[in-house]
Amino acid sequence: MNRIFFIILTVITSSATAWAFTQTDLPGQLIQTALLQNPGLQAAEAQWHIYEKKIRPAASLDDPLLAFALNNYPVDTFQGNQTPMTGNAVKLSQKFPFPGKIGAKEDKAREMSLWYKGLYEEARIDVARKVVDTYYQIAFLDHAIAITEKNAELMKDFIRLTETNYSVGKGLQQEVLRAQVEHSKLTDKLITLRQKRTTTLAMLNNQLSQEPSTPLTDLPETAIPNINTTIESLLSQAEENRPLFKGYQALEKSYEAEIRLAKLNYKPDFKVGMGYTFREPTGTDPGTDFASIEFGINIPIFTDKRDDNLAAAQIGLSMTRNQLNKFKNQISLNLADAQSTFVRAQTQSDLYKNGIIPQASQSVEASMSSYRVGKTTFLHLLDTLMNLYRYEIEYYQAVSDAMRSFTQIKAETGTLIQDDARSL
């Protein structure tokens, strides 16, 4: 009996002193590992650099054309000195696009590079968010497992106590069965929690590009930060910091450059060339060499394909603007949801910490005192202990929800990687 009371007092004491928090930068360290090792980020970065390398080619002229020709050889003899018209020619020509085309191509390539840079930087934020979100899920599961293990051990002692009391006629079989049922429920809960932690840890290690079973232990307590700002201010931060806003602006400019290019494609390109013909002397001609200059343009008479190219670019610009509006609306929705979740979870955690759990601990103490003098039943004492157990779990769930929603807010505003500030 004394052992039972000692264990219960230990449970109450640990519940009452569980609110001393320490700050660590473990989530920040995990973020840095993910940013260095995540293969998806490496692929996104490579895609960005691919488009960077397309800027210079887009801004360059086509290579000049060097040609050799054997001109006007008589087919009966193929002699180079038979007629004055025969000669060996060397020609050099260069194609010049209509003014403005190269600039439009360069602008399009540069803005597309910035678009993919924005996608890469957005992917970094998303990976960081997933890492921290998973971290706080594991933190909750660790607390839940520890609390459940503690109560499962307590139930073993209760089972022994009830069995002893029942064997000497001081207890009821109902008490034995209730203690056994509670222990079985806790054991089942432990199986579920441990399986979920294994899966969640594998998800975290996947983001870190590590083996699924790479351990993560001894996670410290975390204090819930404060959010002292409005939705409007958060939206303003998002528009300033989210890379995809700049990415969409770059994509708009890319389509605008494509529209300019499509309109310029109705204009002809130019070709300038020069040639030199080496001639052999004939009986009637000294074989003076010839020099020549040529100038040509293409004739853009097939307008259907140009019409379609222009229409496609205009549709692309309209699509991008609609996507940008959708992106803004989604951020607004996500921020509103994350902030309301944070406020709810923060309020619940404060309620559990400062009200429900201390009151539940006092209820356990009162039930224990009453049970000692026979003024309450064992089942009532058990109920008060199980209530305390549930409140502890719910408290840590609220803390986890608050930190996960806070992480979502930091991600939505684009500040999750910029710093590890604990408040907004």
Image (spheres, helix red, strand yellow):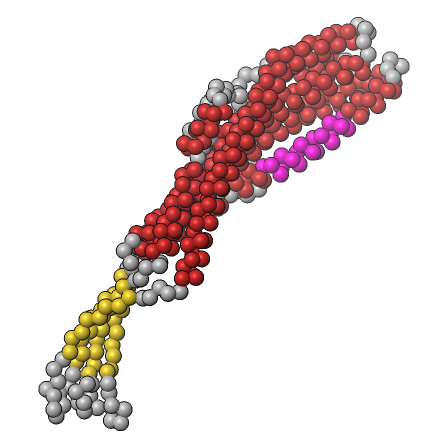
Q: Say if 56 sits above or below 72 in the image.
A: above
Q: Residue 416 in the image: x percent, y percent?
A: 46, 31
Number of numbered discs:
0
Q: Please tell me whether residue 388 belongs to the stretch shown in magenta.
A: no
Q: Is residue 191 magenta?
A: yes
Q: Position of residue 251 (x, y in %)?
A: 41, 45
Question: Can residue 34 be seen here?
Answer: no
Q: Nearer the viewer, residue 194 or 110?
A: 110
Residue 276: give x, y in percent of width and height: 18, 75
Q: Farthest left residue?
A: 286
Residue found at the far right of this picture = 169
Residue 288 visible somewhere in the drawing: yes
Look at the image and tell me in which quarter the N terminus lies. top right
- Residue placed at 62% from the left, 37% from the top? 198
Q: Quadrant of residue 266?
A: bottom left
- For image coordinates 66% across by 34% down, the residue present is 194
